[in-house]
Image: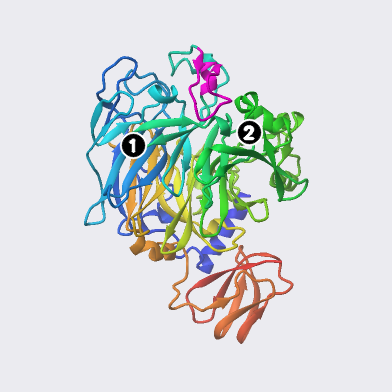
Amino acid sequence: MLKFISTLFVCMISLGILKAELPKELEVEQYPLYPSQVIVPKSKLGYQVLFVGGQDMVQTTPTYGNAAGAVPAKQWHDFIGFTPASAQEGGLGWVSVNHEMIYADDNIGDGGGMTSFKIEENTDGTLKVVDQTIVDPKSGVTRTGKFFNVDFVNYVGETGMNCGGINSEDGRVWTAEEWWQSSNVGISSGIRDTSDYTISAPDFSFADGQTIKKVQNLNWMVEIDPKQAIAIRKQYNWGRLPFEGGAVANDNRTVYFGPDDTPAPFTKFVADVEGDFTKGKLYMFVQNEGQAAGTWVEIDNSDWDTMLDLRGYTIENGATMFNRLEWVAYDKFNDVIYMTETGRDNPGSRLKGGFDNGGKYANHHVQRATEQGTTVDSDEYWDYYGRVLRYDPKTNEVTVFIEGGPYYELEYDGWQDQDWNPLPSKHLSNPDGLNVMYVKGKSYLVILEDLNGNSHGRMHPGIDSRICEMWITPLESNQKTAEIDDLVRIAATPVGAEITGACPVYNQNGETIALLVNSQHPDAFNAPPYHNSLTFALTGWEDVISSIIEDGGVADQENSMKIYPNPTSRELNFGEMSSAALYDMSGKRIKVVRNTNRMDIMGINPGVYFLKFENKPDLHKVIIER
């Protein structure tokens, strides 16, 4: 396999496919990347650090009998939410940053945490964190500063690991308590009070007044108010799962959820009234046998026992099982849901356990196992790299949008200079964070890595730590799939750090001001401040998006040939008479035409190809469908 990939890599270079495919600072010649700080394409995008965990001070409320004050922010920044400001409020809006780090803290609160702050745009296009004064609704205490601890303890009880979350179109924010624990013993290292908890939730009559184990008050989606830096409610009617991500659709009624679990169900909630998520129906996705399409089966979300054990209920009642669903993103222009399925090296035993309890295997996992010459329930079945899935609400189909990889197997152990070959210049491993960014009326999918390890080609041989990367790719109407070659690398985080967050910021005119991103849990030896978790901003998208995509391999439209339709199933038409050759992904020439304005592609297998015109420098990617 290593020899084949090296050959393919050489073929692609000879074709020019890799020409200018990466922003200059991340060219393949610099591989393997081993940065001690965040790397971004200089001169392309503005870059600045906004918020540093363990260093910036957060303003707290009176907690556990301690007075309000200022303490260093928690670490491990994950999800980022953004709540736009009105013209009367001024500025751009409020940023909410999750903290996965779990420990006991007398001022911030035990468990995980969250920080909110307000930003505005400077005249030079950079961002500024502004000073605020807010009054805590419960204690009446005034807090003044730049960064504010979100109070969970005094409003909804302690919170767990604050991992992913949900950000609605109108700026509402939910944090996901992903850290799954099944007993009070497991949470005692980060939450000191493990006595029973009595719920106060007037929005949910079935839960209000229930006395539960402390651990059962974790693993919910929790709505917060970033302007006041307080938690509003735990969404007991959405059920208890190891939540990671979610997305609210255009109707402001439908919410889709991704739990980080194997097996993981795919669920959704549909509100009775637009914008009111306290009342509505809950559903689980059940794929038809051997098909991508499925149906939504209603769950009684007024039954308290079911909501407490939604994890078990869904599997026992035939839900389709996924391999670590994590972030969920919604493309409002094309009405499509994308989900990261991060993967797990050998998920067979976990999936088999779910199957034995009533769950159903996802269709794409059955297909992958068959291609590997095994079965989904086998210990031999591997899922090293994960993928991005696509859910189409119009057809109820869940399909693979982009598969992780490509597969890369080393034929030797350890670092041997004479045998070393680089990974392919674009390699997607364990996609986790996900979002859709809109620039000049076009959708771009943003994909962020969180490597499950450095084995199986996820990292270069000899590198014993992780470097995670962020990618973008344009989204077209009715686009069913994408290829690794479509991805454009935008950033890489310091050694050891996960790259996550990816939250676009728009102004009141709808212009893209920034993309906010997190670097979390880096190695301690990185240069300051990159030895801490931090939140950074990439600005200038409205000016540079076209040039960045061109650096990613997209042809210059002014000097390139027009080809249509693409994708196609019968023929390709050219904008002018020319001679052209069609190549497959290995660099093999498939077909040649001379002095014509069309190419008949009937009889050519479906897939991705490259078209080269005589006397033209660019290669055009062509997708053949059937």
- Residue 208 covered by magenta stretch: yes
To which quarter of the image does residue 506 belong? Answer: bottom left
Q: Amino acid at mark 1?
A: Ser
- Residue 406 covered by magenta stretch: no
Q: Magenta region, mostly helix, strand or loop?
A: loop
Whether residues under marks 1 and 2 lie with C-beta atoms below 8 angstroms apart, the answer is no
Whether residue 259 is visible? yes
- Side (left or right) of 446 relative to 5: left
| Residue 58 position in % (x across, y down) | 28, 30
Mark 1 surroundings: few (<14), some (14-19) or many (≥20) residues within 10 A: many
| Residue 577 position in % (x across, y down) | 56, 87
Mark 2 surroundings: few (<14), some (14-19) or many (≥20) residues within 10 A: many
Q: Amino acid at mark 2?
A: Thr
Whether residue 56 is visible? no
Q: Which residue is mark 1?
A: 116
Furthest residue in direction right, as rendered: 289
Q: Which mark is residue 262?
A: 2
Q: Which residues are magenta?
A: 196-217
- Which of the two discs, 1 and 2, labels the residue nearer the N terminus? 1
